[in-house]
Amino acid sequence: MKRRAKFLAGGVLILGALGYLVYAGVSQSVVYFVTPSELMATPISGKTYRVGGVVQAGTLKWEPRSLALSFVLSDGKTTVPVRHKGTPPDLFGEGRGAVVEGTWSSDGHFQAASILAKHSEEYKAPQDAASEPGYKELMRTLQGNPDR
Amino acid sequence: MIPEIGYAATIVAFGLALYGSVTSAVAGRTGRRTLVASSERAAVGVLVLVTACMLLLIYAFLTFDFSVRYVAINTNRGTPFYYRITGLWGALEGSIILWTWMLALYTLIVVVQYRRRHPEFYPWVLSAMMGIAAFFLLVMTIPAPPFERLTPVPPDGRGLNPLLQDSGMITHPVALYLGFTGFTVPFAFALAALATGRIGDEWMTITRRWTVIAWYFLALGLLIGGWWSYHVLGWGGYWAWDPVENAAFMPWLTGTALLHSVMIQERRRMLKIWNLTLVILTFSLTIFGTFLTRSGIIGSVHAFTQGSIGAFFLGFLALVLLTSFSLLAWRMERLKAQGELDSIFSRESAFLLNNVFLVAATFTVFFGTIFPLLSEAVRGEKVSVGAPFFNLVNIPLFLGLLILMGVGPLIAWRRASADNLRRNFLVPTAVGVAAAVLARALGIANSLVLLCIAAVIFVTGTIVLDFLRAARARRRSGDGWAAATLGLLRRQNRRYGGFVVHLGVLVVALGVAGSNAWSLHTETTLARGESVELGGYRLRFDGLRGSEESNHFKVTGTFTISNGVGSRDVLYPAKKFYAQEQNPIAYVDYRLGLIEDVYLVLGDFARDGSQATIKLQVNRMVSWLWLGGLVLTLGTGLAILPDRRKTA
């Protein structure tokens, strides 16, 4: 009986420690997923959010030398100005969906620590990208110019 | 015509699997030998038909039959030959074929191996395996038919996701699925043991090697997945606690627990219920993982309703859990332990603690993975928990497991004496502590890394000490060192195979600790001729070049990298523009090294080639992960060699 009590105590101790770890882990690292409208309703500065929306056309600016990226994220109702330092991800662009994770800054913009581009799995006709003027121009300017 | 034949084959195979499952269950109850023979023929039929399905789909890929939806989505005319074949498992439907095929193959191996042995278990094992195969064939028939037609037929396909056009993607799913399906065999034997009421150690002894092999393939699949992620995705990491990764990690954790806890049952006749539970959990987690990654539920609870595939897997999972735990409850009376735990300082309790830690880790990974779903379903709030949660809860558990890895194999059974503890652990503990102090003096400040180093050196010390003692004992009987070593490895291959596997895990652990603690990175834009410095390296941007490849347009950067010693090298990171993708795919270039990798990603660039934005990383000790995989392979090979102790 004494031994059983010892093992019981050990079990409770382990479970308690585990429960504490999970509790602390969740409360420290849970990130709320919100829309621009939800964020702008009551933005709390310093708190980490994930904001999902569409990159508004004509708002995307990127300065390669300073790596300063800025754009406006919209859900059709409200918009959030976003700033980020770094290269935009490959699947990122105007009119596309994006999820940004970061904090609301007290000076009125969302400072994104990371940007996740939403990528569509739908079937697309293969000519889409190749017929884009940008793609053609790229092939013209860079093809056949070794180490230009 | 081909797709119709394939679809017909799927339906017939489903019928055969169902038939075989029922007849062998009846044979299990009545002992009628002819019924068993009949379901064996059904098993052969299933393998032949599923093989045919797979070959037909490959044929459709090779002939660009874009009238098949799956082919149109996963290949196009520019896709290189071998990626047309591996395109087979590039998405859901083909993965299910591969899975079913491996299951059918394993079933036939079971038939060949056990047909004349274990006559009580065998019909039930066959019934369980064919029942599971029937489920996967049902999935191929209704929610995910690989031969579904597409109208109108497109002139060209979409093409395989460029990220999957990589050698890692050829081997990663194969290894992973060999692991997943491999756990079906121990599970089927466990069910057979419960069905027949022969719940001794027999089922476990028979399936030990199967468990080791399934565990190994799962480990290999996880490591190859890490390698693929590292060199293809361009973020410089190998593990992100992504739900897809977690799905494969959870059965590996419970499988590891199982491999350890069966030893206590073998030696001390304890933990019978626990071992059966672990087998059931491990198998269920492989199904749960597929549900999680394929139902669309990860994105959101609402996405779950989009396809019926999730409902199929959830229903099957419920059936598996209900059946196995009902059987377990029914046999509970017979499963009383014969041995008892005598002391906290014993091998039993070290193994028990190992199991507690592993199952706790599984639980926290499970909880973290489904917490966003729970939160959305219960409170209507969308949240994510992310890597910080998983690291915070798992690092202490994994450090505990590392230390136990040193304690478990050497501490005495039943009750360890103070002398046993001193003899086995005093020197390794001292060496471990000394190593941590030395590392601290060399400038490593991260206390988790120091703990990890101490634990790794401690465990290595225990293994070396044990091996030296045993080899010295053999030498006394006249062998040379080499002969003594070989003799030990051969005669106690299970024990030393296990030790080598432990060494492999230690190497991986050092890689994980090192890469997290010392890696450096920078992100910058360079004009042509300009340089950037990082971690003793200087990187110069030399220019950009565009080229038309078979199925994409490629922009390649030329960068010269040099270090202080004067050695120079050129890196060519690129961006690939696939016509079917709206956005370019980064192509990473790197120099791998034992201590550090130089890792370069081309981010953006000016259209005239005058400047390029890059991400440069110096990733330290990442190679140790792949090295650890090699050691793991050696150890597993040693551990599954035929046991010599019985014959010698």
Image: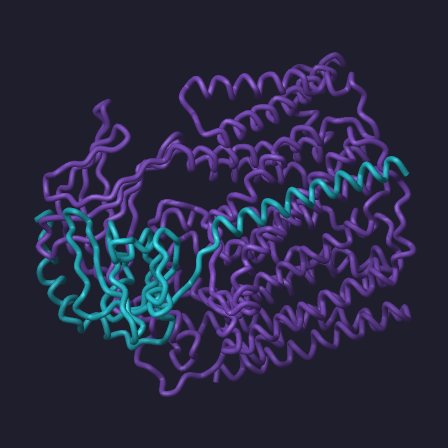
Chain colours: A cyan, B purple
Q: Residue at x 40, y 60 (%)?
A: B82
Can residue B5 be spotted in the picture? yes
Residue B410 higher or lower than A102, as above or below: above
Q: Nearer the viewer, residue B104 or B294?
A: B294
Quadrant housing residue A61: bottom left
- Left or right of B123? Residue B438 is left
Residue B272: image x %, image y %?
A: 82, 49
Measured as percent of width and height from the top left, residue B592 is found at 35, 37
B536 on left or right of A99: left
Lateral position of residue B134 relative to residue B526, left or right: right
Residue B221 visible: no
Q: Is residue B359 above or below residue B480?
A: below
Q: What residue sits 82% from the left and 70% below the top?
A: B25
> What residue is drawn where x is 58% and y is 49%?
A23
- Give percent across and percent down for residue A106: 28, 53
In the image, farthest residue toward the bottom: B152
Q: Position of residue B6 (x, y in %)?
A: 54, 79
How many numbered marks does the figure carry? 0
Name which residue lies at 80% across and 25% down.
B416
Question: Is residue B350 toward the left or the right of residue B609 in the image?
Answer: right
Image quadrant containing the C terminus of chain B: top right
